[in-house]
Image: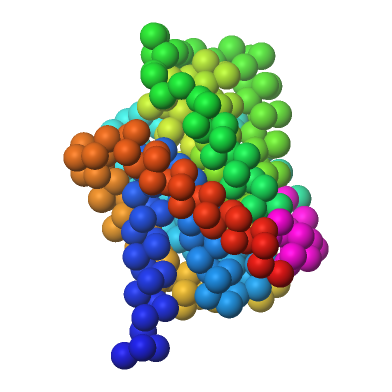
Amino acid sequence: MTEWLPFLWLFLAGCVAGTLNVIAGGGSFLTLPILIFMGLPATVANGTNRVGILLQNVGAVWGFHRYRVLNWKWALYAAVPATVGAGFGTFAALIVSDLAFRRILSFLMVAITLVTLLRKDNLPDKEGKGADELSSSSVTGLAVAFFIVGLYGGFVQAGVGFLILTATTWAGLDLVRGNAIKVLCVLAFTALSLAIFAWQGKVVWTLGLVLAAGTVIGGQLGVRLTALKGHRWVKGVVTVTVIIFAIRLWVTG
């Protein structure tokens, strides 16, 4: 019975992470440390974590496409450079030592959490541009921004959703279309990153699939939890949890 407990905890962590990803993002800031605390080397945890991210975003892309808010033409302008950047970022993650990665992850967890706390939760007064209204200069800026986003996402993945929404908002997209582009980009570059990690033998598929089962279910729970508790409550819980994990990652050798 006890040999199943780690799988149960990982599944539950996936549920929480999937919920957080629907509400705001940053679910990997929970799952990555948990995989490391389960005994996986940091690089292997980084690769294994991508299994859940990939499967979660398959369903998300299909959902946005079904509701006809995903413009494939403009989304590809973001997804292609992001995927190229992710290739470089993934190889960088493979050559960084486990201790260095843990320290970098710890720093990013605190930094992005603080940025999220300081960011206003209010939506903009106007919805922004539709996907068909992007100018050529916006397309160029979006491509450059998403190459940088891809570098980050290929390296660590955690928190990349916040960066993507910042880039799409800067380009003038409303939040609905920005989220649609976000999930397609994450799906595209996660597929490449996961393939590279798997090629290097840095993925534990059993744990990855257990985690994926949790993230898929958690994504559905996110909608209901948001309605019951509200964004501010969830945000407070996430902030405390992420900071605790970050401190433990930093002090654990």
Main secondary-structure element of the magenta-colored stretch: helix
Question: Can the viewer see residue 185?
Answer: no
| Magenta segment includes 135 | no
Provide residue 134's location: percent of width, then percent of height.
54, 15
Residue sitting at the far top: 125
Name the residue at 59% across, 54% down: 246
Name the residue at 45% across, 13% down: 129
Quadrant of the image occupied by residue 92: bottom right
Quadrant of the image occupied by residue 216: bottom left
Q: How many marks?
A: 0
Name the residue at 65% across, 73% down: 41
Residue sitting nearer the eye, 80 or 126:
126
Question: Can the viewer see residue 53?
Answer: yes
Provide residue 46's location: percent of width, then percent of height.
61, 62
Q: Look at the picture and state if 240 lies above or below 168.
A: below
- What's the colour scheme? rainbow
Provide residue 125's location: percent of width, then percent of height.
39, 9
Q: Quadrant of the C terminus?
A: bottom right
Residue sitting nearer the eye, 186 or 46:
46
Provide residue 71's location: percent of width, then percent of height.
44, 29
Residue 99 left/right relative to 7: right
Residue sitting nearer the eye, 109 or 171:
109
Residue sitting nearer the eye, 243 or 211:
243
Magenta span covers which residues?
89-103
Q: Quadrant of the N terminus?
A: bottom left
Name the residue at 42% across, 14% down: 124
